[in-house]
Amino acid sequence: MARFKYPNYLSQTKHGSFDLTLQPSAFVPAGGIYRCTGCGTEIALEGVGVFPDRGHHKHEPKQGPIGWQLVVATVSSLPAPYLHGAA
Ligand SMILES: [Zn+2]
């Protein structure tokens, strides 16, 4: 589970981007921290390019396939590719 120390740097949102499960090698829609829906592994990505492929890490059969869910979206005042927060 993602951790933080200073809550004043994070704010809650109900944005639908956090409800999606994105597939390996899919386009990354927003920069931020993503968790694997199968095992909980977390990765940080810029909002550019694609997610790691299906070989990124191994799962036990009971964990199912790798899927990526947005946990923390970055917000920036800089132009693309840095502004991809799902605020
Ligand atoms: Zn996983």
Image (cartoon, rainbow, N blue to C red):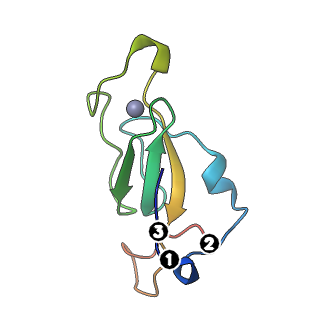
Please tell me which of labels 2 and 3 falls first in the chain: 3
Check disc 3 and give the amino acid type: Phe
Mark 2: few, some, or many residues within 10 Å (few <14, many ≥20)?
A: some
Residue at x 62% of width, y 53% of height: 18
Residue at x 48% of width, y 61% of height: 30
Is there CB contact under 8 Å for labels 2 and 3? no
Considering the image in quadrants, where does the C terminus appear?
A: bottom right
Helix, strand or loop for disc 3: loop
| Label 2 to label 1: alpha-carbon separation | 7 Å
Residue at x 46% of width, y 38% of height: 40
Cβ of disc 1 within 8 Å of ligand 1?
no
Residue at x 66% of width, y 47% of height: 19
Check disc 1 and give the amino acid type: Val
| Label 2 to label 3: alpha-carbon separation | 18 Å
Residue marked by disc 3: 4
**Toward the viewer: 47 or 10?**
10
Q: Quadrant of residue 61?
A: top left
| Label 1 to label 3: alpha-carbon separation | 16 Å
